[in-house]
Image (tube, rainbow, N blue to C red):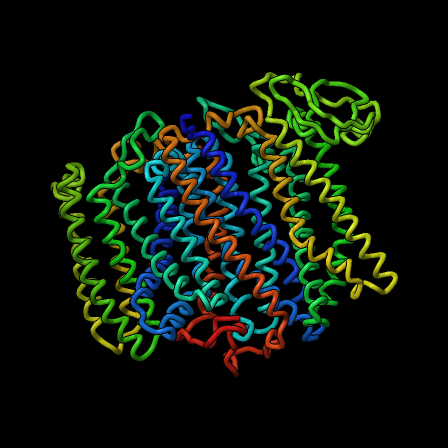
Amino acid sequence: MIVDFVPIWTLILGLAVFFYVLLDGFDLGVGILYNFADSKAARDLLMNSIAPIWDGNETWLVLGGIGLLAAFPLAFAIIIPAVYFPILVMLLALIFRGVAFEFRLRDSEHRTFWDHAFGYGSTTATFAQGVVLGAFIQGFVVEGRHFAGGSLDCITPFSLFTGAALLFGYGLLGAGWLILKLEGALAARARAQARICFIGTLASVGIVSLWTPLMDGAIAARWFSWPNIAWLSPVPLLAALFALLEWRAIADPKVELKPFVYAVCLFSLSYLGIAISLWPMIVPHHYTLWQAASAPDTQIFLGAGTLFLLPVILIYTGWSYWVFRGKARADIGYH
Amino acid sequence: MTLDPLILSRLQFAWVVAWHILLPALTIGLASYIALLEGVYFFSGKDIWVRISGFWTRVFAVAFGMGVVSGVVMPFQFGTNWSRFSDATANIISPMLAYEGLTAFTLEAGFLGVLLFGRNLVPRWAHFASALMVAAGTLISTFWILVTNSWMQTPAGYKIVDGLFYPTSWMQIIFTASFPYRFAHTVVAFYVTTGFVVMGVAAYLLRRKKSAEEARLMLSVTLWLLSVLVPLQILLGDMHGLNTLRYQPAKLAAIEAHWNREARAPLTLFAIPDMAAETNHYAIEVPLLGSLILTHDINGVVPGLKEFPRADRAPAAIPFFAFRIMVGLGLVMLALAAAGLWLRLRGRLYDQDWYLRALMAASPIGFIAVIAGWTTTEVGRQPWTVYDVMRTAGSVTPSLTGLDVLISLAGYAVVYCIMFPAGLWMVMRIVCAGVSARDAAPVGAGRPAAPVKPVPGDTR
């Protein structure tokens, strides 16, 4: 083989999953905060702020899942069965919250039911994704090319904690989006929610950062051995900087975009932190990215198209966001 | 009885895909139909076209949303329940599924928002272009999914090393022997399905004397389309059958419940196939017709199930009956289209009550035929996931217990039993409200001048 495509595919898949986390993260976050909206007018606005874009955001979940299958099929075949029930719960919750966009409008007699479907569905799906993340970091029982544990192995104190942590994280992204898209009292309320979610997120990131090295000697060695500690120190330092900036941005009623942007920066650094902890494993403790990779022919065939298509997709997705720019309104959005 | 994770996983896959396929069957047809309506409106400027388009766009929005959420479930099934299949075939099928996501889902999602919500926010041409892009996205999605499915039916372009499939020719993988027939037959099936839904709704509106002008136009245009598409579909089905005879003889034998290889074979209209005794009970047969239909030659040889080892035979009863349901419904559709043409010639198309009632009754006919056809082809492929190469029994996730799958199947069963009736009810409400004047929204760039009112019945 002349060229090693695994690093390229690691980057593509990493970006796809990260896009999903950001994009569906903020609209699931809006769904979590939807539980706390106290009037029909407020709920209408919250939902309209994401109605034109949610299904595009969810597309990235499919792209992430299929991307894992395409680039690292062995990891897909081991990890997905290992998180059988969290995936099931996530999918069922996403069904409820996805149909609520249309059903809530068409079925005014049962609007409260569909409101709950949207709010609880978003919350449950987020929690389940957090459990998947925690279980993935902890690793699985593997024999040969198969997951060999039980279907409830993935439910641990750590994975339950990461499930709860993600609620705060997506809540922070959602609140950042709402600060951008709403006005007046609703925007002020989103700031208050952003503050709570920010504190929760920061505490969670801190606890996970201590818990993972205590749980896993390899992760401790990765971060705290010399000279790694020097090379990797910018990650926590930058996180601290962005946390400070985020705190100030949330507090300043004049800045509307920055709370969202800094929340994205915090997510990026946390994501990078997890990647550094696990590198180069894709099935922690068992298989590296290279061992789990698909055939080079497959990576080339798909990679060529992907590199051509991704910029095109970003252009028209950007156009769609541009069309629906500006503050969310109660009067547009529904056809 | 012990719970078998294999059987339960197959039931679960059948359950989630059978419900899911109903939605693309409608949205693929509607997306093209809406693009057609928007196109006529764009070039003619007549409001009636945009009123009809707005009406069907509301139905489309409900169906598309449900299609997205039930579709997200599908790729994860490969991982949760069919991990050995995923591990073995990923090198081949994953690029097809990934290209579906990259070329189709993103296209649909990117332009759907503008199609549904953006009529007043973008120039007219951009809205029409968005309708075209969404329609193109649905067709591209169909292309890749049927590429994948056809490869599983008639695999080519691969080699196997240590139990894993590796690609040798992407052209052979994409354009397999059964692909062109399966693709054409499926797309036309979805168009015909949508056509009968549109005709049924138009008939309902005509009988209720609601939105009569729009309903007449819907009925007229759709009947012209179906007059071409239904005969075309029967022709395509016949060609698909010849293809199956050549490339999947064991499947064809199961579909026909035909036991002995023979020339001048009869056509079995009805029978109870008995896999254990290798015979049919209560068979009703027409001499010679089997060879004539299946091979286009009265002396043609039809394969029999006994040619194949018992372990390699599909359970004949299911594809046998499913196929007969599909063909029977196809003939009913042909009769309905022909009756419509005859009434049109006599100028009685819009007021012949028995015909309008028949059209209403026939509105779900395409969905039933699609499910029957899908059952025929997928059960007919058994006991293989990759025909003649990889067995279904060897494809299932090894770590699963029967209880795991029973719980997940119950979860999908409960949720789908809430969602799908609810979705149907929403669509029926939209239909009952009829086409409204507000569907002809003022068109122009920039923000809307007046608020767009929510649906009738909304208490805002």
Residue at the image point whose x is 66% and y is 56% from the top:
B197
Residue at the image point whose x is 64% and y is 45% from the top:
B368
- On screen, residue B362 versus residue A178, left or right, reads right
Q: Tell me, yes or no, if residue A300 can be seen here.
A: yes
- On screen, residue A53 versus residue B325, left or right, reads left
Residue at the image point whose x is 31% and y is 72% from the top:
A38
> In the current view of this chain or complex, which residue is farthest to the bottom?
B449
Q: Identify which residue, A323 or B420, lies in the foreground.
A: B420
Rendered location of residue A282, percent (x, y): 31, 38
B312 vs B409: above or below: above
Q: Identify which residue, A127 or A62, lies in the foreground.
A: A127
Residue at the image point whose x is 47% and y is 23% from the top:
B161
A23 vs A211: above or below: below
Q: Identify which residue, B408 or A285, lies in the foreground.
A: B408
B207 vs A329: above or below: above
Q: Quadrant of residue A326?
A: bottom left
Q: Quadrant of residue A76?
A: top left
Rendered location of residue B150, percent (x, y): 60, 36
> In the current view of this chain or complex, which residue is farthest to the right?
B346
Q: Quadrant of residue A239?
A: bottom left
Rendered location of residue A204, percent (x, y): 19, 54
- On screen, residue B274 versus residue A134, left or right, reads right
